[in-house]
Amino acid sequence: MMSKSYIVLSLIALCMLFSAPQSNAQGITLGGGLSYGLDIEEIGLQANGYYDLNENMRLGGDVIYWLVDSPSGIDITYMEFNFNAHYIFSQDDALTLYAIGSAGIHYADVSYSDDMGWGGASLSYSDTKLGIGIGAGVEYDLGSLILYGEPRFFLSGLDQLALNAGVRFRL
């Protein structure tokens, strides 16, 4: 389920990027940073990339790998694959403010293995959900790099408020 949905969303994003009208766009930015999920109370590693469609819109995506503290014998994996649209509503020389709309695939996997010699019991559960999110963002352009901060709330999927911060580089 996760791989088919991720492939479909990726193909849609690529089609939108290559069919976008050419304008005075600034190009492509790539970056990464940290996320903090207020519901799961964990830190995540985020990688992202964006393409400027025009001076008010950009499309892109991010992947977040949540660093979940797993108890002994239990392996927990949480990941998000998000397609994002940014609507830029305010921009001056260095400061940019934007609204965020997100659609994503949220994946969770929990595995337990008893290797204590008492029969070797193991259990596994995984779940994939589609997520829809809204948020806001702020960027501060330092020239060679851009600092960003984004609170984003997912209304489905992991159902949480996440705070994202990091840096982006213009290509």
Image (tube, rainbow, N blue to C red):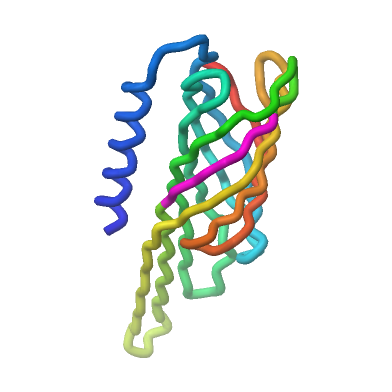
Q: Which residues are magenta?
A: 97-104
Q: Name the spot of residue 123 as percent of width and height, x first.
A: 35, 79
In the rendered view, tell whether residue 118 sits above or below residue 112: below
Image-based side of 69 in relation to 28, left or right = right
Point 61% across, 39% down: residue? 99
Residue 110 versus residue 31: which sits nearer the camera? 31
Residue 70 versus residue 90: which sits nearer the camera? 90
The quarter holding residue 26 reads: top right
In the rendered view, tell whether residue 91 sits above or below residue 123: above
Q: Name the spot of residue 42 as percent of width and height, x first.
A: 63, 60
The quarter holding residue 121 reads: bottom left
Point 49% across, 62% down: residue? 156
Magenta stretch encompasses residue 67: no
Residue 38 versus residue 33: which sits nearer the camera? 38
Q: Name the spot of residue 68 as percent of width and height, x first.
A: 56, 62
Image-based side of 158 in relation to 162, left or right = left
Point 46% across, 37% down: residue? 61
In the rendered view, tell whether residue 160 sits above or below residue 30: below
Residue at the bottom extreme of this rendering: 118
Image-based side of 57 in relation to 122, left or right = right
In the rendered view, tell whether residue 152 sits above or below residue 38: above
In terms of secondary structure, what is the magenta stretch mainly? strand
Residue at the top extreme of this rendering: 24
Image-based side of 20 in relation to 146, left or right = left
Q: Name the spot of residue 62 as percent of width and height, x first.
A: 49, 40
